[in-house]
Image: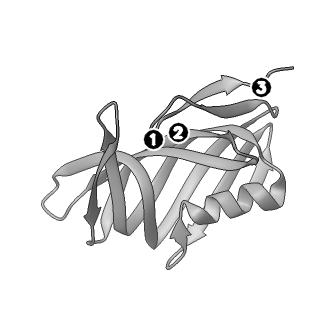
Amino acid sequence: MKRENGITLLRFDRGEPFPQTLKDHCLRSGLESGVVLCGIGMLSDTTIGRYDGTEYAKTVLTDSLEVLSLQGNISMKEGEPFIHLHVSLANHDFGAIGGHLFEATVSMVIEMAIVELAPGLVRQPMGGAFWRLESAKT
């Protein structure tokens, strides 16, 4: 990990559950609000989904896939860090697939940059699986 000018660079290693290890980092460091600028690396056993306005349709990708794009945000939901990530992945035929990242295993490495924000981003229920991102009420 390297932290400088409000930006944190993190590395997650082979075999680590992701994004759970990012949530664990947030719990240890006290990070409550942030923007995931970018991430690179490889994931396997990846569960991604697409929200249809009511629920998520999910698929599991077992192969080790190259991360083309990894971005999102960090907020608080029911008193714990909530990691909201979207990912684009390349398969062995150079085809791409992506969606909301639910869980995966780091198959090589994940390197990512996070802009840390002051606490105050929270998730509020809207009904169903979607929780709206808002500024905390003061």
- Closest to the observer: 29 or 68? 29
Quadrant location of the N terminus in the rendered image: bottom right
Q: Which mark is residue 108?
A: none
Q: Is residue 31 left or right of residue 63?
A: right
**Mark sitting earlier along the chain (2/1):** 2
Colouring method of the image: one colour
Q: CA distance from mark 3 to mark 1?
A: 20 Å
Can you name the residue that lies furthest to the bottom here?
Answer: 15
Callout 3: SS: loop
- Closest to the observer: 13 or 29? 29
In the rendered image, residue 3, in percent from the top left (x then y), is placed at: 78, 49
Residue 89 position (above or below residue 128): below
Quadrant location of the C terminus in the rendered image: top right
Residue 100 is at least partly visible in this image: yes
- Residue at (54% x, 75% y) in the render: 16
Mark 2 in CB contact with mark 3 (< 8 angstroms): no
Say which amino acid is labelled 3. Answer: Ala
Residue 85 position (above or below residue 137): below
Residue 120 position (above or below residue 78): above
Q: CA distance from mark 2 to mark 1?
A: 17 Å
Report the residue marked by disc 3.
Answer: 136
Report the residue marked by disc 2.
Answer: 72
- Residue at (51% x, 62% y) in the render: 110
Residue 122 position (above or below residue 89): above
Callout 1: SS: loop
Report the residue marked by disc 1.
Answer: 129
| Crowding at mark 3 (Cα within 10 Å: few <14, some 14-19, many 20+) | few
Q: Nearer the viewer, mark 2 or mark 1?
A: 1
Callout 2: SS: strand
In the rendered image, residue 124, in percent from the top left (x then y), is placed at: 63, 31
- Residue at (28% x, 64% y) in the render: 60
**Mark sitting earlier along the chain (2/3):** 2
